[in-house]
Image (cartoon, rainbow, N blue to C red):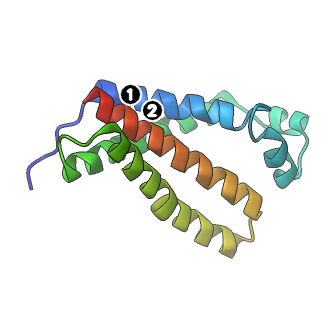
Amino acid sequence: MEPVQIDPLAVLVAAVAHFVLGGLWYSPLLFAKPFTRAVGKTEEELREGSSPLMYVWAFLGGLAKSVGLAVVLGWIADDLGVAEAAGVGLLIGVLIHGAADAVNAFFESRNRTLVAISVAYDAAGLAIAGAIIAAMS
């Protein structure tokens, strides 16, 4: 198998998009209220426990996922269309991340609403990242 060529700018843009989606996903525009209820804390308590380091880790996680997705897309084909790459990202998000997160959540007795919100976020984020990587590569 030959090494996969990835476009660093496409990966970076995909990671930024994933990070921005997270800001929207967990905002009052989308899932802040059900997330807050499922965590069992108030918005103030969540803000007090927040630190800039959390956002650095969130970005780095999105960057790692974008690199991994770019490698997988490169293994599949050099000329995947935007829709196909988005579909691959969605499948990875649901079938790999989702399955792993759900299994861990059941053993840890985590709230199922939190799992659903988290898995849906990563599936959407990876679909967007796949579309971006395909469009820019």
Residue that carries the numbered disc 1 in the rendered image: 12
Which percent across, then down, holds residue 57? Answer: 55, 38
Kind of element beneath mark 1: helix
User: Which residue appears at 65% of the width and 28% of the height?
Assistant: 52
Which percent across, then down, holds residue 100? Answer: 53, 66
User: Which residue appears at 60% of the width and 46% of the height?
Assistant: 121
Say whether residue 26 is visible: yes
User: Which residue appears at 29% of the width and 27% of the height?
Assistant: 136
| Circles 1 and 2 in contact, beta carbons < 8 Å | yes
| Residue 5 vertical placement versus 99 (above, below) | above
Which percent across, then down, holds residue 17? Answer: 50, 29
Front one among 106 and 33: 33
Kind of element beneath mark 2: helix
Q: Amino acid at mark 1?
A: Leu
User: Which residue appears at 53% of the width and 67% of the height?
Assistant: 99
Which percent across, then down, holds residue 34? Answer: 82, 48
- 67 on left or right of 29: left
- 93 on left or right of 10: right
Residue that carries the numbered disc 2 in the rendered image: 15
Crowdedness near tag 2: few (<14), some (14–19) or many (≥20) residues, C-alpha within 10 Å: many
Crowdedness near tag 1: few (<14), some (14–19) or many (≥20) residues, C-alpha within 10 Å: some
Asked where in the image residue 9 lies, by quadrant, the reply is top left
